Image (tube, rainbow, N blue to C red):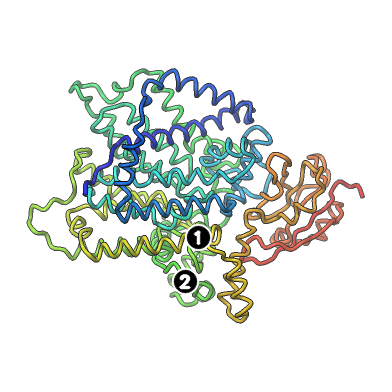
Amino acid sequence: MGYRLDPMSFLSFVKAWLWISALATGTGWILSALGELNRRGYVVTFAIILFLFWAFQHKQVPKSFNLKRSLKKFQKRFRHLLPLGFLILSVLVLAGAVLYAPTNHTALTYRIPRVLQWLVHERWFWIHTSNYRMNDRACGIEWLSAPLLLFTRSDRALFLLNFIPFLLLPGLVFSLFTRLGVWPRVAWQWMWLLPTGYTFLLQAGSTGNDTFPTIYALAALDFACRAWTSRRAADLFHSLIAAALLTGAKASNLPLLLPWAIIIVPLLRRKVADGSRQRMGSLLPRLALNVLVFLSAALVSFLPTAILNLRYCGDWSGLALERAGMDMKSPLVGIWGNALLFLLDNFIPPFFPGAGWWNQNALSLLPSFVVRPLIANFESSFHWLWELPTEDWVGIGFGLSWLLLAAVLAGLWLKPVSSHSPASHSSGTLPAPWRRLVLWSAWVALLAYSMKSGMSTGARLISPYYPLLLPLLLTGWKQTVIVRGGWWRVGTWLVVALAFPVLALTPGRPLWPAKTILSKLHRAHPEERLIARAANVYSVYATRSDPLAGVRSLLPPTIKIVGFLGRGDDPDISLWRPFGGRRVEHVLLSDSALQVRRRGIKYLAAGDNNFALNRTTFDAWLQTIGGELIAMTNITVRVSEGPQTWYLVNVSGQR
């Protein structure tokens, strides 16, 4: 078996995705600044981009395509178990994404609604809302979503923003791993295994934004490594754009610039290929192009969001607005606390019936010297576990975590066959000292993240970190011996096999008749708590994409503006549907009746939990606002919270 990849088999697709991402992000910011974030603005921009592509790049497009040869390559590649497993899992991911509407909670709560707000106002703006995440968070996936939402008026195609990067993962993993010293035989195994990590697998058909930047992280380092040997400015440019997109996707990815900078900084000082004393900058064709590339990188990075955060809340990171526990108080507690949570979330069995018991008793079972610092520094739900892996919290998960641990321990057990056994595969890309520095710097980046973040779902937030952490553990000839072993083969089969039920059983996109079977089981065994719990979970997820449909159905069909009064974690997505037909205006409890009416709001949807959270009642607010209760209904948005009362109120002042 040859462990090589045809560079053009995936590299051109990676470059294309980087440019699509950069153009979508840059276009979003520019059109927003011009007040033209609309169909006209996008059509004109797309026309200009297509003309420039035709003018400068059409000669580089291959003029022939051999379908027969490509099919033979495809068959040869996927006749082996691991590639075949990846292929089947990809098809199942696609099936789930096509069959089900998006159910990712954070996407429905603030990422899609904030884009809808920008589109209806034709620009980015600081939204009047209690949901601070609609304002201070990075805008990477939002700018990719904007044209899809604008032209399709649907969120059903948004999964492609995760699915396409998922398909590109194997090729980039192999390329970067071998460049960082992992032997090709070992890299070939992990290029197919890593995408079976639950966070990648479950978000591949989702609207989450944790895993899609992984491609940017891998590409940033891969193109930087390529530039060491190619001496081509194009590789440097692609690395820079990928690194910028990585930060533009999520601020939590900023520490990953460390391994990238370790490669890039000395690269800029290296001699060019002809041996002259000029620096890498001489490889850049023209000063104007250099400036354009660097400005483009700044535009698609987190920098615009940081500037806007400074302008509107006085804190570039936006942490001044975040809830308690988001910003770590004690860096030392952050290090060991996050390490504990990463291990807990990744090594827990994928099917864990005791999750409810654990959530109720964990804090009393653990030693007080462990619990007290965690409570003081992390979000209140830091210890929570769930019966099934979901995209809202899971990391790479049980299968990969235990297989990786077994590989590392087996490597420690093996004895060198000679004193000359090479420590790593020499790819000819980076000098050995620099390569070791890059390998360790990824772990330093994770350390920096841990010192700063107190979020309870860190295992999913560090998704782009996982591929950069693994090479340090997988270098050396010992791993080539391990992947030849029979136990390893069995282990990989188990990991792939376990990925299928994890994917099929996920509540958001079940690939089995969950509601039908569970309802029958519940009727037959009403006393079984787990069956009742499962039936409730799948039932809630079945309506999660449109949670307030019952409230929307009560609205008069002619209403074009509807008010929304909810907590920061309540989704308003249902009130926007069908997209393009209605505008949602957020209302705060402190807003007066006059302020509400001046915004054209006649009808308003209000959630009861918001009043309890602010120590008031619906009746007291209704009297203050001078509104009239039209209808009320009970809706379950989150399983853990149970039913919540929602009210539809006439606030126009007209009876």
- 393 left or right, relative to 402: right
Determine if residue 451 is in view.
no
- 133 left or right, relative to 375: right
- 311 left or right, relative to 497: right
* Amino acid tagged 2: Phe
**Which of the pair 115/319 is nearer the observer?**
115
- 248 left or right, relative to 647: left
In the rendering, which numbered label is found on residue 117?
none
Judged from this view, the residue extending furthest toward the bottom is 527
Q: Residue at x 73, y 58 (%)?
A: 607
Q: Compared with residue 610, is residue 276 higher up or lower down, i.e. above or below?
A: above
Residue matched to label 1: 390
* Amino acid tagged 1: Thr
Q: Earlier in the sequence, mark 2 or mark 1?
A: 2
Q: Position of residue 612 (x, y in %)?
A: 72, 63
Query: Which class describes the residues within 10 Å of circle 2: few (<14), some (14-19), or many (20+)?
Result: some
Q: Compared with residue 620, is residue 72 higher up or lower down, i.e. above or below?
A: above
Residue matched to label 2: 352
Q: Position of residue 388 (x, y in %)?
A: 49, 66
Q: Residue at x 30, y 36 (%)?
A: 7
Q: Compared with residue 551, is residue 159 higher up or lower down, i.e. above or below?
A: above
Q: Are marks 2 and 1 in contact (CB under 8 Å)?
A: no
Asked which secondary structure carries label 1, the reply is loop
Q: Residue at x 73, y 42 (%)?
A: 582
Judged from this view, the residue extending furthest toward the front is 68
Q: Residue at x 35, y 50 (%)?
A: 467
Q: Position of residue 439 (x, y in %)?
A: 27, 48
Determine if residue 147 is in view.
yes
**Which of the pair 226/465 is nearer the observer?**
226
Mark 2 to mark 1: distance in Å?
12 Å
